[in-house]
Amino acid sequence: MVDEYTSDSNGIYKRNIFSQFHHEPMPNYKFHEIGIYTGDISEVNPDAGIEFNGFDSAKAGWWLSKREFSTPEEYEVVDSVPYQQGEYDFSVLDNQRFFKARTIKYEFLIIDDDPQYRQGSFDQGMNELMRLPYKETDVDNAYMDLLDTGSPAYKFNVKCKSVSSSDDDEKGVMTVTVEFKGDPFAISRSSADEEIWDEIDFDNYLVQQTYYEINGELTLSLDNPGMPTPVNIEIENSSDVVIRWPGESRSNPTIVKPITHIGAETIHGGNVTKILPSGNNNNIGFTGTGSVRLNFHYRMMY
């Protein structure tokens, strides 16, 4: 957890008012009787919920009552020998832990005295959640961005697995359960070099420089507050560029060939994907001539 106190230029610690751990003092309200509310409950709209594949639960009038997030199960490779305390764990490869698909569940309430309205709202929502947009390829076609108002800086790459309901006609309430299945991590909505105010996690987010000119030797440092994340490296180079990446052998670095032209087609030598380790001060080196842009999003275990 990031400390809610941060120091200013004078070394004086002040509260980070944008931290999720910062709470304003509660005002001392004096309550008094205002009478009974007699308006239609439908006049009050939800302000929390999800967006997925064009479906917006708040606009649909679905009241979010419960979220269920669980840690995804890890792919484990373990072994033990007699008379050993514990076991050997071989689950880590290239400084990464690997996880299975995760499940995310939500519970919503559709509140209305008219049972036909409740059923109609459910049918419409289920259809929007389960349908697929057209894509040229069927690979991962079902996986789309899930946005949650509870995590405004992140998105989840998931598919809708099921939508079910339980109706209580006496109370005029239908309970809807929506289950998603998908990637194990929350992914930052903005890339690491973007500073979009509404998409910043002020406790963990880092806005970093990701474009550099290469003229001989270049050493830069990238921070990663989350899980190891893929970095797409785009290099515009006029000569061979050598990449020295954290965790890779210095004796066998990646060499990117310069741009070549075949007829009207331009072939870029520098479209390379690397995995950025977790932690601060990941030192990366480049040798050559050209420019480099590092495109990546943070992946968090939320």
Image: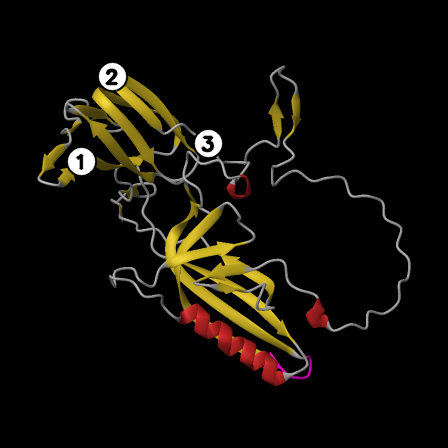
Q: Position of residue 238 (x, y in %)?
A: 17, 24
Q: CA distance from mark 1 to mark 2?
A: 18 Å
Choose the circle earlier in sequence order: 2 or 3.
Answer: 3
Residue type for callout 3: Val
> What residue is shown with label 2?
215
Q: Quadrant of residue 271?
A: top left
Relative horizontal placement of residue 129, taking residue 11 as reference (left or right)? left
- The colour scheme used to paint the residues is secondary structure
Residue type for callout 1: His
Residue type for callout 2: Asn
Point 39% across, 71% down: residue: 131
Point 50% across, 72% down: residue: 125
Q: Quadrant of the N terminus?
A: top right
Single out the mark in the foreground, 2 or 3: 2
Q: Which residues are magenta?
A: 167-171
Residue 173, placed above or below residue 189: below
- State whether the magenta stretch is mostly helix, strand or loop: loop
